[in-house]
Image: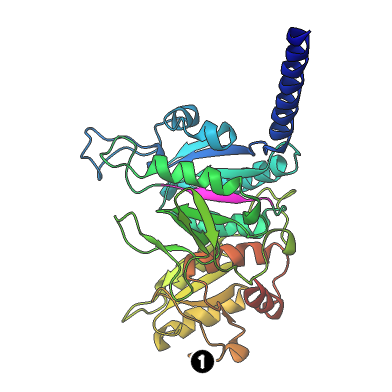
Amino acid sequence: MKKRIYGIFVTLCLLVLSLQVVVFAAETPEKPNVVILATGGTIAGAGVSSTTTVGYTAAVTAVDKLISNVPELAKVANVRGEQVFQIASESITMDNWLTLAKRVNQLLAQDNVDGIVITHGTDTLEETAYFLDLVVKSEKPVVLVGSMRPGTAMSADGPLNLYRAVILAGTKEAAGSGVMVMLNDTIHSGREVTKTITDRVDTFQAPIIGAIGVFTGDKPVFYRQSLRKNTVATEFDVTNLTSLPRVDIVYHYAGNAGTMIDAAVNAGAKGIVHAGTGNGSIGKAEYPAVENALKNGVVIVRSARVGSGIIARNGEANDDKYGFIASDNLNPQKARVLLMLALTKTSDVNEIQQMFWKY
């Protein structure tokens, strides 16, 4: 009789324990589904030795190898990869941008995709990030990541950057932040970040404005968000776009007589971003070329070569008189991105100026 009672007691204990296990399993959150889209760059680069940090070959490691090199990814997300293209980012084209943006939007429309990481070379990473920030049509996290050292280098920064980018892309708190850039444990807005140093791992900064968050251990912590409209809140749609209008950047310097402005017009530019001195100044000798460009219907945006700061409308030039557009705080390369997309919608300079204040 005692054995029977003891057996019943043991059975009840095991039943209770099994129910606790079931409840615990039900409460354990599933890992997010993150897609890694690889485009090349230093993060996929290789050097001749472990001390080679310059003179290496970029864009040689395929996405599957990038993923297998960081086995810890499997602990934080269900990861799969796609090789969109394999190039050093200084060679990226507008066709590449359109291909990438369309694929991002296709993936984010799927219920089984929670976020996207894009591996990218650092040279033009900020431009791709801002382009995507304007054309991605989802609030799900999109994170661009790269590295300053190839994967073969001693203390390579790529693997940890990739690991934390995947965590960020799978974090619910990151949703609605626009397209982000994650390197060196720092989270930046794709609109505001820029590469500031040629060779250091802390090269990506957002001058004056600062980062939107940081990693503490494996946890992303946010402190602010960009207030400029992005992703689902923009009017730009690349679904049916097969090309982007040509926009060139003309750099001002002492003694510039407008030769490069004429060259851009002759090459068929629909827009020109003038990287002026100081607060976007245009030299006196440039004005004949500027006026010729305007007569040919070319839209001109005033930006600055100094790297940061706001371009004051009607400050260093009579914008109202000439029909110039002030770039707000966008640097020349980012002003070019917005101008290209703006020109797919309108050539009205007043409407485009509003876009520069909105986005």
Q: Which residue is at 72% across, 52% downward?
A: 138
Vertical position of residue 316 compared to residue 340: above or below: below
Magenta-colored stretch includes residue 174: no
Q: Is residue 348 left or right of residue 203?
A: right
Q: Which residue is at 47% across, 85% downward?
A: 287
- Name the image quarter holding residue 297: bottom right
Q: Position of residue 242 (x, y in %)?
A: 68, 48
- Name the image quarter holding residue 222: bottom right
- Name the image quarter holding residue 21: top right
Q: Position of residue 292 (x, y in %)?
A: 54, 78
**Tag 1: amino acid:** Gly
Which quarter shows the C terminus?
bottom right
Q: Which residue is at 69% across, 31% downward?
A: 25
Q: Is residue 174 left or right of residue 253?
A: right
Q: Position of residue 345 (x, y in %)?
A: 73, 65
Vertical position of residue 89 compared to residue 230: above or below: above
Is residue 88 visible in the rendered image? The answer is no
Q: Return the residue nearer the eye: 201 or 300.
A: 201
- Colour setting: rainbow
Q: Return the residue nearer the eye: 340 or 175.
A: 175
Vertical position of residue 51 compared to residue 338: above or below: above
Q: Return the residue nearer the eye: 173 or 148.
A: 173
- Which stretch did the figure color magenta? 140-146
Under tag 1, what secondary structure?
loop
Which quarter shows the N terminus?
top right
Q: Which residue is mark 1?
A: 315
